[in-house]
């Protein structure tokens, strides 16, 4: 695999060419993931004026980091430069940029006062859509003065007040990534999309259904999704072994796993364990109500 310098964070990393994209893996735009750059746009990014690069490349880096940190896939074209520049979602003020840092800390912790290490600190100013490290430090200083975070070197913590502000500031934005494991994606996905996935979103998670776990290979999509998620919902309809395996892998990663099973399959669980105590449901409406109650209590506990 060849190495290239990322346009937006200037870090040299491995690049994987897949289909019509170059995928930059593990650069500071997506430290725990990757982003794609459409092949037909690469020369156009090269030819942008220096003033445009200086203004927009740090912002694009911040955009990539936020989106991939929320579990979204990013594939950029040259047209995205203007759309990101003029996006109403782009933070402009110090207050708005500080809110993005609070939301990042919220995504990476399970409650107030839990430490989150920012590494490397000197290259993480894209967390606040800042153009420079100096602006990043200034924003952190303001948040310290407001007593919404605490800092020890490269480690930040949300205070109780900061946690409340992070949750209040989301206002319908995605909270934390969630992986949904289904035995028969094509059969179950339509009804889950109508009844269950929106409920999960209302409880502060962005659900992503793992595609065909029975066909996924180790190190492929499911593994990558699990490594980034905060919550796994594993439905045991049909008792597909791969769902048990993927959920067990998530438990090994210290992820929260909620097991569900339709009433018709509840009496024949092939695995008996205290770790597997599924919600038993009759209809997806019933399951949505149970998940809403469980996730609401879970968020309060955190």
Image: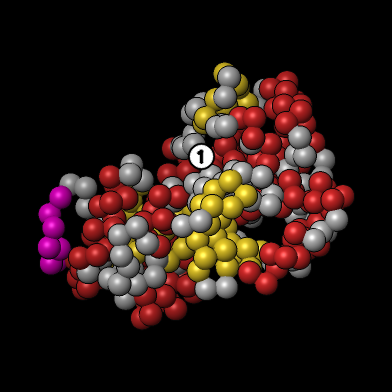
Residue under pointer 1:
108
In depth, the one of 203 and 84 nearer the eye is: 84
**269 part of magenta stretch:** yes
Expressed as whole percent of the image width and height from the top left, the position of residue 56 reads 79, 51
Tell whether 209 sits left or right of 112: left
Residue at position x 15%, y 50% in the image: 273
> Where 69 falls versus 147 (above or below)?
below
Q: Is residue 65 at all visible to an observer of this figure?
A: no
Label 1: state its secondary structure: loop
Expressed as whole percent of the image width and height from the top left, the position of residue 281 reads 30, 66
Q: Is residue 239 at all visible to an observer of this figure?
A: yes
Which residue lies most toward the bottom here? 187
Expressed as whole percent of the image width and height from the top left, the position of residue 187 reads 36, 81
Dominant secondary structure (helix, strand or loop) of the stretch shown in magenta: loop
Q: How is the image coloured?
A: secondary structure
Which residue lies most toward the front here? 2
In depth, the one of 205 and 5 nearer the eye is: 5
Magenta span of residues: 267-273
Residue at position x 49%, y 74% in the image: 194
> Where 27 falls versus 285 (above or below)?
above
């Amino acid at each position: 695999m060849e190495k290239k310098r990322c346009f937006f964070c200037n870090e040299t990393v491995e690049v994987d060419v897949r289909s019509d994209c170059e995928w930059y893996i593990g650069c500071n735009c997506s430290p725990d993931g990757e982003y794609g750059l459409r092949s037909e746009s690469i020369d156009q990014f090269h030819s942008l004026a220096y003033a445009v690069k200086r203004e927009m490349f740090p912002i694009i880096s911040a955009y990539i980091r936020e989106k991939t940190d929320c579990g979204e896939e990013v594939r950029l074209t040259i047209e995205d430069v203007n759309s990101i520049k003029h996006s109403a979602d782009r933070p402009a003020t110090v207050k708005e940029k500080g809110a993005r840092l609070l939301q990042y800390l919220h995504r990476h912790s399970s409650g107030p006062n839990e430490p989150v290490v920012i590494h490397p600190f000197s290259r993480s100013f894209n967390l606040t859509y800042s153009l420079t490290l100096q602006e990043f430090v200034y924003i952190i200083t303001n948040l310290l003065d407001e007593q919404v975070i605490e800092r020890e070197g490269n480690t930040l913590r949300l205070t109780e007040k900061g946690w409340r502000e992070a949750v209040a500031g989301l206002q319908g934005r995605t909270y934390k990534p969630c992986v949904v494991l289904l035995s028969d994606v094509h059969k179950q996905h339509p009804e889950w999309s109508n009844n269950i996935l929106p409920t999960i979103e209302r409880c502060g998670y962005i659900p992503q259904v793992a595609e065909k776990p029975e066909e996924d290979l180790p190190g492929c999509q499911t593994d990558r999704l699990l490594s980034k998620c905060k919550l796994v919902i594993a439905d045991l309809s049909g008792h597909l072994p791969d769902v048990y395996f993927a959920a067990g892998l998530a438990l090994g990663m210290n992820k929260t796993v909620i097991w569900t099973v339709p009433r018709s399959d509840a009496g024949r669980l092939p695995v008996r364990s205290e770790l597997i105590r599924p919600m038993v449901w009759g209809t997806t409406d019933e399951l949505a109500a149970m998940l809403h109650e469980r996730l609401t209590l879970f968020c309060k506990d955190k």
